[in-house]
Image (cartoon, grey):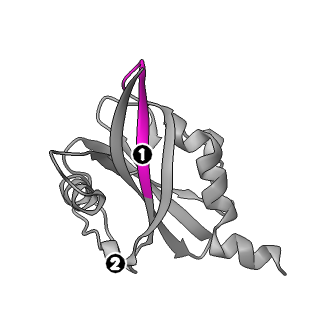
Amino acid sequence: MTRIRVAALALTRRDETGEALLLVRKRGSLRFMLPGGKFEADESDAACLARELREELALAFDARTAVRLGRFEAEAANEPGHIVEATVYRQGAARGLNPVCGAEIEEIRWLSLTGGTDPAALPLAPLLTGQFLALLSAASPTRSASAGA
């Protein structure tokens, strides 16, 4: 199988219902995924994410405040017969953050990591449906705080 290397961002925000994860759906796709994308020639993870987030969501990426979660593999959501190899970073969203659909992004959604929205209610990319979403939910500061209560 052909591998596709991407950089992706797990951008989270806190609100009255807990912590939520930003997901995007590309034009022509039914599945929601993390924002990010494919590398251009000789790009670093930070450069790729900065470019993709600016083009797709009109957001800035600050590598100094992002935490590398690791490299994850899954079946590609939109390219049959391909495996996506994603280097994923996590970053908290600044208050008042307002992502807007740009480039090929058709829709933006916030998925609750601490309850409220059932992940099964949304068609998710394979990268999210495996252990990755469970990993993020388990690491959620809100969930950790309520688990200790």
Q: Amino acid at mark 2?
A: Arg
| Number of numbered discs overlaid on the protein picture | 2
SS under mark 1: strand
Q: Are marks 2 and 1 in contact (CB under 8 Å)?
A: no
> On the rendered structure, is 19 left or right of 114?
left
Residue lying farthest to the front in this orientation: 42
Which residue: 50% across, 39% down? 73
Q: Which residues are magenta?
A: 79-88
Which residue: 45% across, 35% down? 31
For disc 1, the marked residue is 86
Above/below status of 82 relative to 22: above
Quarter placement of the N terminus: top left
Q: How busy is the neighbourhood of tag 1: few (under 14 within 10 Å), some, or many (20 plus)? A: many
Q: Can residue 123 be spotted in the picture?
A: no
For disc 2, the marked residue is 64
Specify whether residue 107 is painted magenta.
no
Residue 83, picture quadrant: top left
Q: How busy is the neighbourhood of tag 2: few (under 14 within 10 Å), some, or many (20 plus)? A: few
Mark 2 or mark 1: name the one nearer the start of the chain.
Answer: 2
Q: Main secondary structure of the magenta part?
A: strand
Q: Marks 2 and 1, Cα distance to the nearest angstrom?
A: 19 Å
Which residue: 24% across, 45% down? 39
SS under mark 2: helix
**Coordinates of residue 81 in the picture (x, y in percent):** 42, 18
> On the rendered structure, is 130 left or right of 106?
right
Q: Amino acid at mark 1?
A: Ala
